Amino acid sequence: MKSDSQHIGEAIGRMPSGCAILTCAHEGNSSGMLVSWMQQACFEPPSITVALQGGRPMLSLLEGSSRFVLNVIGENPTAMFKHFGKGFSLDEDAFEGVSTEPSEYGPVLADAIAKMGCVIVSQMSVGDHIVFAATVEAGEGDIEAKPYVHLRKDGLKY
């Protein structure tokens, strides 16, 4: 193994992840953003982790509501990437033209292959990201649908 950033980035980039749209609502505001750093964390209680880069507008909604929906993207991600990949300020309508249903956890995307209603139980700062651990209190998924699998050439940048 080598300790230079090029080799470390290549190695980290080979770690597969999925992609999802994290949605949240708080005090009349709602938004959604593309996330690729999420993972199941434990079986009991069913829990996941998700990491968001510091400074994202979504952080204020998450910290206020302590709830979110993780909407998993299927193997054809183009429409979701185009819509949510650009990011949104809290003043913009992140869901214009997107079919959603309200839930107590945040907006649920109709086109997601899996949806999880989550409650944040802890968070920690790790470098330039904040990692949230959350219990999954509600969910549904299409077990026939295939998720999008994401790999990066360089695991040290998006």
Image (tube, rainbow, N blue to C red):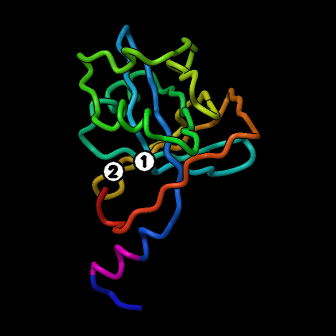
Which residue does the image show at 31% across and 15% down from the upper left?
93
The secondary structure that dominates the magenta segment is helix
Inspect the image, locate mark 1, and give the three-letter code of the amino acid beneath it. Ala
Q: Of the residues under marks 2 and 1, which one precedes in the sequence?
A: 1
Circles 2 and 1, Cβ within 8 Å, touching? The answer is: yes
Inspect the image, locate mark 2, and give the three-letter code of the amino acid beneath it. His
Q: Nearer the viewer, residue 43 or 33?
A: 33
For residue 25, which numbered disc appears in the image? Answer: none
**Which residues, given as a range, are shown in magenta?**
5-10
> Residue 7: image x %, image y %?
34, 82
Can you name the residue that lies furthest to the top here?
Answer: 28
Position of 42 with respect to 109 (left or right) is right
**Badge 2 is on which residue?**
129
Which residue does the image show at 53% across and 62% down from the upper left?
16
Q: Is residue 78 above or below residue 140?
A: below
Position of 100 with respect to 55 (left or right) is right
> Residue 39: image x %, image y %?
57, 51
Q: Report the quarter where the N terminus lies.
A: bottom left
**Badge 1 is on which residue?**
51
